[in-house]
Structures are given as structure tokens and as C-alpha cells.
């Protein structure tokens, strides 16, 4: 078994950013805890639909950067888990599909 760090292709940056899930109808705000050139760890409010974050499912995000820029990201769920009962949130790992140049520049200069 390999350590999760060994699987990473790029360096993770610890951040505290807000984003919005574009493909939802209720409570769409999420928080980004860390990111890299090709991945994001987001925290969401509890979800009623357990199939919402099934690995392989698509998620579209609108990320707000520290300089006020908004970047749309197409992502696929890699993993997800419910943090209850300790915390009423969900943790979701996302793979960014074809990261836009503006996102890559943001990560590089963060």
C-alpha cells in the first residue's frame, strides 16, 4: 500500500477559499481547504443525496481567488466522505479536468 503523498503529481497548497458548485439547487457554497495544479479538496455542507459525490461524477465549480478573480473549473470526484458525527460537513477530493491557464497561474503565484 502506498502513502497518499506518493500518489500526488503536484504540490498541495493549504488555502482558505470560497467556491460555488454550479450544478446544484440548494446550499451551493463550498470551502476549498487545499489545492494543486490538478486537484482540490473541498468541504461542503451535509448533502441529502448520497449519490451526489460518487467517484467519477462531474462537479463544476466557480472558484473565487484571493485577488477577486472568478475561475470556472470542470472536475471529477475522486473520493468523498461524511465527516459526521464530529463535524456536519462532507469532504470531497476533486480532479480538475483540463485546468484553465488562469487557474494554473493562480496556483503558481499563490
Image (tube, grey):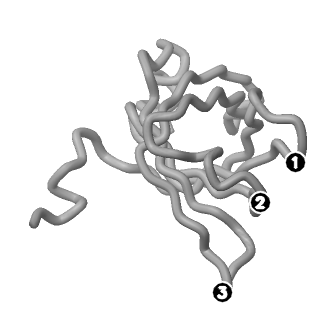
Say whether disc 2 or disc 1 marks the residue closer to the N-terminus: 1
Residue at figure coordinates x 52%, y 29% from the top left: 75
Residue labelled with disc 3: 86
Residue 110 spot, x, y in % from top left: 50, 39
Q: Secondary structure at mark 2?
A: loop
- Label disc, if present, on residue 27 of the rendered structure: 1
Q: Nearer the viewer, residue 23 or 19?
A: 23
Residue 90 spot, x, y in % from top left: 64, 63
Q: Nearer the viewer, residue 35 or 1?
A: 1
Residue at figure coordinates x 73%, y 39% from the top left: 19
Residue 108 found in image quarter:
top left
Q: Is residue 11 depicted above or below 98 in this figure?
A: below
Label 2 to label 1: alpha-carbon separation? 7 Å
Residue 9 spot, x, y in % from top left: 22, 40
Say whether disc 3 or disc 2 marks the residue closer to the N-terminus: 2
Q: Nearer the viewer, residue 95 or 46?
A: 46
- Label disc, if present, on residue 45 of the rendered structure: 2
Amino acid at each position: 500500500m502506498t502513502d497518499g503523498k506518493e500518489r500526488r503529481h503536484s504540490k498541495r497548497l493549504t488555502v482558505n477559499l470560497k467556491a460555488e458548485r454550479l450544478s446544484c439547487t440548494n446550499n451551493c457554497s463550498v470551502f476549498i481547504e487545499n489545492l494543486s495544479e490538478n486537484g482540490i479538496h473541498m468541504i461542503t455542507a451535509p448533502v441529502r443525496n448520497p449519490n451526489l459525490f460518487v467517484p467519477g461524477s462531474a462537479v463544476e465549480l466557480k472558484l473565487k481567488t484571493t485577488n477577486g478573480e472568478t475561475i470556472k473549473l470542470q472536475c471529477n470526484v475522486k473520493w468523498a466522505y461524511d465527516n459526521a458525527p464530529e463535524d456536519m460537513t462532507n469532504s470531497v477530493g476533486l480532479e480538475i479536468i483540463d485546468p484553465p491557464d488562469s487557474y494554473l497561474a493562480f496556483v503558481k503565484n499563490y
